[in-house]
Amino acid sequence: MPEANPRQPREDDPRFQRSLRALHAALLELVDAKPLEEISITALVQAAGVTRPTFYQHFADIPDAVRRAALTRLDAAFPLPEPFPEDFEASTQNIFQHVVGEALPVIEHLREHREFYLRVLDGAGNAAFFDEIVSFLAGRFLPDAFELAASRQAARKDDLMTVMAGGAMWLMVRWLHDDTPAETAGEMAQRIAAVAATMVAPLREERP
């Protein structure tokens, strides 16, 4: 197998970016339709309309390509949240409602593309990929509230966010693996929101 070239950002190269977008689009369609073990580099480059050497300009192998396509799909679906307004009251109930609003679209997206994400997790998941997912979720769940929580607790903001995001990820992964989950997307969002609110809301308040 040829060695993958160092994949440094080449935003100033339109051809590089076009071929990357073509590969991502083709890969999403292929993984939506079939398991990873049935997808070859030959089939992918044919679907994308690029050459095999072009594939190796971007990726090391199919699992590497799939992981990056999954993160790109997630990132495109969910922009960074807006910061809290200055007059936001960080009460348990307000934080609970805020997290429900942030988490529900993510959970609905994951359920809509359930087969895709399960194939990526089960067929290409590794420790680095899970770290990237946790980092992604941490950036979407209450960065402002965790800053506030860290200021009044003996814990670092990034540790709080990592624990919250990692726990939320495993709750969602287990939920996705269930063919007929007992909980709706809305109910799962509420479970995650209740945990987040408990972690960051003032200790004197009761959980919603």
Image (tube, helix red, strand yellow):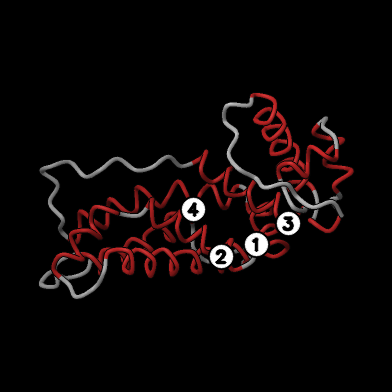
- Coordinates of residue 73 in the picture (x, y in percent): 58, 43
Which mark is first along the chain, 1 or 2?
Answer: 1
Tell me the residue at 44%/61% (across/down). 188
On the rendered image, what quadrant is the N terminus found in? bottom right
- Residue receiving disc 3: 63
Which of the pair 100/1 is nearer the observer? Answer: 1
Secondary structure state at the residue bearing disc 4: helix
Q: Which mark is residue 109?
A: none
Which of the pair 133/198 is nearer the observer? Answer: 133
Which mark is first along the chain, 4 or 2?
Answer: 4
CB contact under 8 Å: marks 4 and 1? no
Q: CA distance from mark 3 to mark 1?
A: 10 Å
- Residue receiving disc 2: 173
Tell me the residue at 58%/39% (across/down). 9
Q: Quadrant of residue 12?
A: top right
Q: CA distance from mark 2 to mark 3?
A: 19 Å
